[in-house]
Amino acid sequence: MKKFKHINARTLDEAVSLLGTYKRKMEIIAGGTDLLGVLKSEILPTYPEAIINIKTIPKLDYIREEDGALKIGALTTLSEIAESSLVKDKYTALAEAAGRVASPHIRWMGTIGGNICQGIRCWYYRYPHHLGGKLICRRKGGSMCYAAVGDNRYHSIFGAVSGCIAVNPSDTAPALVALDAKVKTSKRTINAEEFFTVNGPKTTVLDDDEIVTEIQVPVPDAGTESAFIKFALRESIDFPIINCAAAITCAGGTVKAAKICLNAVYNNPYRATVAEEAIVGKSIDETNAEAAGSAAISGAKATQNNKDKVQIAKTLVKRVTLLISNSF
Amino acid sequence: MTKFVCPYCSAAFTNFDALKAHVIAEHGEARTPAPEGLLEFTLNGERRELKVEPQWTLAYVLRDRLELTGTKVACDGGACGACTVLVDGKPTLSCMTLAIEMEGKDIITIEGLSDGTTLHPIQEAWLEEHGLQCGFCAPGMIMTTKALLDKNPNPTEEDVSEALSGNICRCGNYGHIVKSVLVAAEKMRRR
Amino acid sequence: MGKEYSVIGKPVPLIDGIEKVTGDAKFYGDIMLPGMLHCKILRSPYPQADILSIDTSEAEALPGVELVLTYKNCPIAFWKDLHYAGDLVASVIAVDEGIAQEACDLIKVEYNPKPFVLDIVEAMKPDAPRVFPDRPNVVPGWAGGAPWLPHPWFYYSEKDPVTGLWTKREFCDFQGFGDVEKGFSEADVIVEDDELNYAYTRVHVMEPRGCVAWFKNNKLTVWSHSQGLYRDKETIANAFGLPSNGVNFISPCTGGSFGGKLGNWVKGGVFGGTGVGLIPIFATLKLHKPVKLVLTREEEMLCGWSRGSWSKGKLGFKKNGTLTTMEIEHWVEVGPDRCSHTLGTCHRSTGCMLYAHNCEHVKIKAGAVFTNRFECQGWKGYGNPEATFLVETLMDEAAYVLGMDPVELRRKNHFRKGDPLADSPMYSDVPVNAQISSCGLEECLDQGSKTVGWKQKWEHPGGKMGLIREGLGMGLMVHGAGPVTGASFSSAEVRVSSDAHVVFVTAAADFGHGQHTAQSQIVAEVLGIPYENVRIVCHDTDSTPYAPHFHGSSGTWQQGWGTYEAALDAKRQLLELAAPKLGVKPEELDIRDAKIYVKASPGKCITFAKAFLVEHGCNMIIGSAGTWPPDYRYVPREQAAQFVDLEVDTETGEIKVLKHVCAHYVGQAINPKIVEGQLHHIGGVEAARWCQCIADPQTGRLLTYNFENYPVATIHCRIEPIIVESPGGDPSHPFGAVACGEGGAVPTTAAFGNAIYNALGIRLKSTPFTPDKILKALGKI
């Protein structure tokens, strides 16, 4: 890696003020498993002057339930979340999602804050500089989305955002959207869905000087169950080809409320509201689940190379719905 | 009146003991920052001090600076586990870790597992069950196994597969590797 | 079974195991030398281009930079014409990797990008852009088609009517024998298929390639990975015009090679290869300082591609399933390398070998096709997996047409011991009338099918309707198991001390296949001493006698005679010393448990120390040998059958493997644990399920540049190994061993494809069998 300055932030305020000082010439490091890949491959047009380590900020590592919500510190590792019996019991989709991220090592090292802020995995975007030069794609300020005209088998099935067809690769993001979570930052608290809803070449709405500090998940209403399914080629290491999380509230065999979210299908986690509408007020059976699956992909705009993702997305929505109905 | 100011959050106290109590309570993990670039940590049970550059990975420092070349770098991207070492007991990808962030950490590498005369039970099992072929993945596999068995002394075959699912062996020796872990677990339980 | 052995056939631990489990073992990348310099490579942004100008002055001026190499000053490693995105443009040698990398960015290059071709079928079209302007993309595999091809093709034209063995072969534009037109006209059933495509896949090494080189005191020392220390040393000496004793090649450990690291010291040779190893050597010869190059994983991913075939075939059968006729056309992608050598094995899966028993007419036309897809290098299977994919798919199709169980169809047609060989066009010194020395295919079929539950579970796919459908498939394979050329000349030295401990000196490379262990077992067995009494010296060429470069999973066979004869030589000397002391002739003696005893009365024995006590005093016995295998008329062949039981999810196209068995004939297993390890091989599974070369159609850049985009097999991918032995093993090896290892790679894609057909009734003709292809075949997308 090329040289950079490394600063251990001792407090949140210090980190925020450093971010202000260095403007965009600084990167935050927590688990480091995403950032170091970016730096080693020199994929971006600019290289940071400084890396600010937030792992040295105390007390950002916790899982607790208080004030009607599950609160998870941003530095909590993914394995801690996956193994927490509290999360597993009541916030199942989140525990399962955290437990399916990459590999055990990455889950020991990677944090929930990092997982929701991670960059995209588009193979053009990540093309290593030392293999003939980085690709300055649309997302990096170039004129062309290489994926749009190239091999886009793993890219968006719901069209481009600002000309880029990359997808959000986070496993935990759809779980947080389905569970109606909030993301607390150094300056505000944002609904998870809104947190990920960006139009530009970013994966979150965070400002340059803003740091995620906490994830808050409201205690689910009585009769709520949630689940997460990931589809990838391998059982470990892989980023999702598609994943899907859902939280469904039932009473007397009827769905009262549902939140279903797909990811790795679009620039943002993709909330399948049409699918939700398709099952609310109904019982969950094979037919209704199938209908929800079909509804979820209405409006899909697959490319020549990724029609399979549409079929898989449809199946995942159906299966996650049926999976939840089995846990009631 | 002399003020005792917290170096981390600028809170002021009237006496040193109050400041100390505050630091322990509020900034428990924070330590006095080392002089610029001088890193202090425990490596295989020994205290080490070393000047590092910020961009150096832990794998680089172990191999190229400390000549502990048992730790291997194969993918240099966090996708193969060959560079696994234990940091405070957790299996850590040393190629995806900045050495400068290892201040105060307790690091164990493959070289720290045996004392030069007696093999660790995991190493014994690896030898007996042919847990290795070319041997390039073995240090990472063995360190990941150590972390698993320290936490779960009685793993099932599925537990083993899950724990080692981030470690790649390109010889494909996975059948022998799983057996080696199970035999190692048995050896460790017997001791 | 065969003879009673005390060390052979025992699962002793690896002789270098302790070093490897403690982290003490030194791979080339672990070599750190004082004042060592580091290399970084500037690579081509274009898949096809000429360098118009190159300015290295700024890079050279950067503090810490010692040397910049380009085609101008180092034509041995760099060319002005570039043929893949990532091809070598220049290299910077500097005091550390960071500076070298920074300097690479300061090199100014002006390119003339040219049209390129990334697809084998496209490349074969007459108007396709040429990879090399001076020659067509299509290279016929036969004599005269390509002067740089090393192997002429043969037509076996005459047979001895009594023995049935071939007696004459002639140069021809195809490989084979008989008259296929006659064969098809007389056939009851004809099966044909085309457009079978085995994806371009990559060798799976853990350790990235590279080397450390140091020219000092007029002597070049090179530390690197190796499959044959002497071959590498000689190639380097030749390349740089150094005397053979002016180079010491050191290779204590190799982090996997599988054939893929063979071509490191040549650029554009017939065996393929990157030539990257030439860079640090060239630099140290100039600078006289140690120079290190270790490729990054991404660079490593540019190297070692092969397969990428496009093929069609036609089989003719009698009603009872007898395979009489076979015609095949087969093209393999060789990237921009002249690695057409792999074609030499494409006929193994045909009537020339695998189905030699009944097949009377065979015609194979095969050739290589250049594309701009990365560095090509033959590896595990070496041309055979792609041809076997074709033949074993056709055999499966035939079984359904004939209404036969696929296993029974194989049983009827596979070769038997003593069948003639008609598969060795590469090696002109194979006697025309060579025979196959042993056959274990029947047992492979028996044990493999039993383990997978074939008889109980296999059924026609017609009635399978569920969401999840189970299918069984299998594939058979044969591969070379003992190359009959200079590559099987081997030598060794065995130093015996009076305490019955031995130092075994050999240049035999061990690149993960346990060869140091297996050969040490042979030494211990011959000398009648415990395995623990053997130490091995093996790490460089200066201190060891010649060993061939191992390939085709044949190391045990290739080195076997040299080791055996050297140990036997030591034993002979020892018994001669002992004989007078026991009052008998040497031939009346033998050794067991480190004691020399009289065979007729085993109680009468002495220790080695006693035998060593002679008038002049004997301190050491040195046994040595340099030898070829004694008899080439009997040629061993590697044989295996794979069985797959899997489920297909018809909604997602996902495959779940329920059981995957590899039953492999090995003659006699020298070390069953090592053999099992060889059968665990995952290259075939990856190729069947996930792995393929993906290049960007617009820029020609490699998109599968890491273990994320090229999803290598994890621990969840497991193969059940079955070792099949025969009484006494194979007669061509001193302890009956046959090569083993390729069987894990060769028939896998066919077995998976056949199992998918058995589950769905749909034939997938292009690997890997990814969810998108399955969903498409099912009509879901």
Image: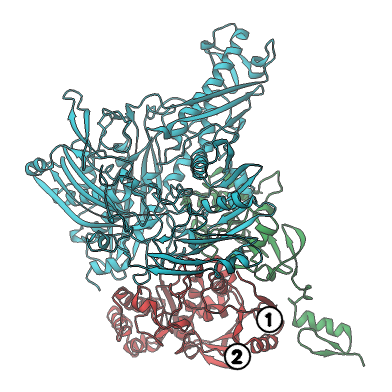
Residue A60: where, in percent of width, then height?
65, 81
Q: In the picture, one chain is red; tell me its letter.
A: A
Work out whether residue C613 or residue C622 is closer to the camera in this orientation and state it.
C622
* Quadrant placement of the C terminus of chain C: bottom left
Residue found 50% across the figure and 34% down from its top? C547
Labels 1, 2: one chain? yes
Subunit under mark 1: A
Q: In which quarter of the view is residue A276 placed? A: bottom left
Subunit under mark 2: A
Distance of mark 1 from mark 2, alpha carbons?
18 Å
Whether residue C467 appears in this view of the structure is no
Residue found 33% across the figure and 58% down from its top? C132
Residue B187: where, in percent of width, then height?
61, 48
Work out whether residue C711 or residue C216 is closer to the camera in this orientation and state it.
C216
Colour chain B is painted in: green
Seen in the image, is C316 located left or right of residue A128?
A: left
